Every structure is written in structure tokens, then in C-alpha cells.
Image (spheres, rainbow, N blue to C red):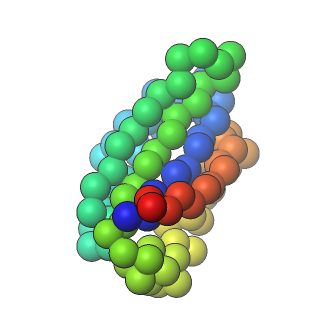
């Protein structure tokens, strides 16, 4: 199992519109790739900034690599275009042993 975690810090002024867009457009677009087996969304409660963690689960390393090669560039660009300079994103990959 591969976990692709995207940490998002979103500005308060864009938060509500961004969250709705993530739930109705971006996450469904991610799932529609067919590469992701499941996902979880977490909101941090102990930070001064509005912070979310999106965990996308891939069954195999091959699925994750295919996602990165075929879909990630477009999907990473989409929120930048919709919400320019209103969020920060950090990404990590975890491998289940």
C-alpha cells in the first residue's frame, strides 16, 4: 500500500470556497483516474493556520507511478489556477511495510 499525502494550508478568505471545490471537483477528479483505491481527509485542530491532510491510497507502486506520470501534472496545476497564491501544498509518500 502506498499513501500519497498532500498537506494543504489554505488562507481563511478562500477556505469555504476552496473546501467546497475540493469536495465537489478536485477529489472526484483524483478518484476518477482509477489509480486511487481509497482516500481520507483530515483537518488539523491544533494549528493557527487552516490545515488539511488529504491521504490518497494506492494499491501498488505501479498505480502510484502511473498516477504521477499520467495525471499528477494536470491535477496539481488545477488548484493553482483556481486559487492562485491562496494555499500552500506539501506532498509526501509513505510505503506500508
Is residue 17 among the parts visible in the rendering? no
In this picture, is 72 found above or below 91? below
In this picture, is 83 found above or below 28? above
Who's the residue at 59% across and 65% down the image? 77
Q: In the figure, is residue 44 to the left or right of 23? A: right
Q: Quadrant of the C terminus?
A: bottom left
Query: Residue placed farthest to the front in the image?
Result: 97
Who's the residue at 52% across and 84% down the image? 69
Q: Quadrant of the N terminus?
A: bottom left
Foreground residue among 54 and 9? 54
Q: In the figure, is residue 39 to the left or right of 72? A: left
Query: Residue placed farthest to the right in the image?
Result: 85
Q: In the figure, is residue 65 to the left or right of 21? A: right
Foreground residue among 48 and 74? 48
Foreground residue among 88 and 44? 44
In this picture, is 30 found above or below 19? below
Q: Position of residue 45 (x, y in %)?
A: 53, 17
Is residue 70 among the parts visible in the rendering? yes
Amino acid at each position: 500500500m502506498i499513501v500519497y499525502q498532500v498537506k494543504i494550508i489554505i488562507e481563511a478568505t478562500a477556505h469555504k470556497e476552496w473546501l467546497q471545490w475540493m469536495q465537489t471537483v478536485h477529489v472526484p477528479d483524483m478518484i476518477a483516474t482509477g489509480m486511487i483505491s481509497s482516500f481520507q481527509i483530515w483537518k488539523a485542530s491544533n494549528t493557527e493556520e487552516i490545515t488539511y491532510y488529504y491521504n490518497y491510497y494506492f494499491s501498488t507502486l505501479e498505480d502510484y507511478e502511473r498516477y504521477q506520470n499520467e495525471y499528477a501534472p494536470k491535477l496539481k496545476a488545477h488548484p493553482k489556477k483556481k486559487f492562485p497564491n491562496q494555499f500552500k501544498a506539501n506532498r509526501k509518500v509513505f510505503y506500508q511495510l
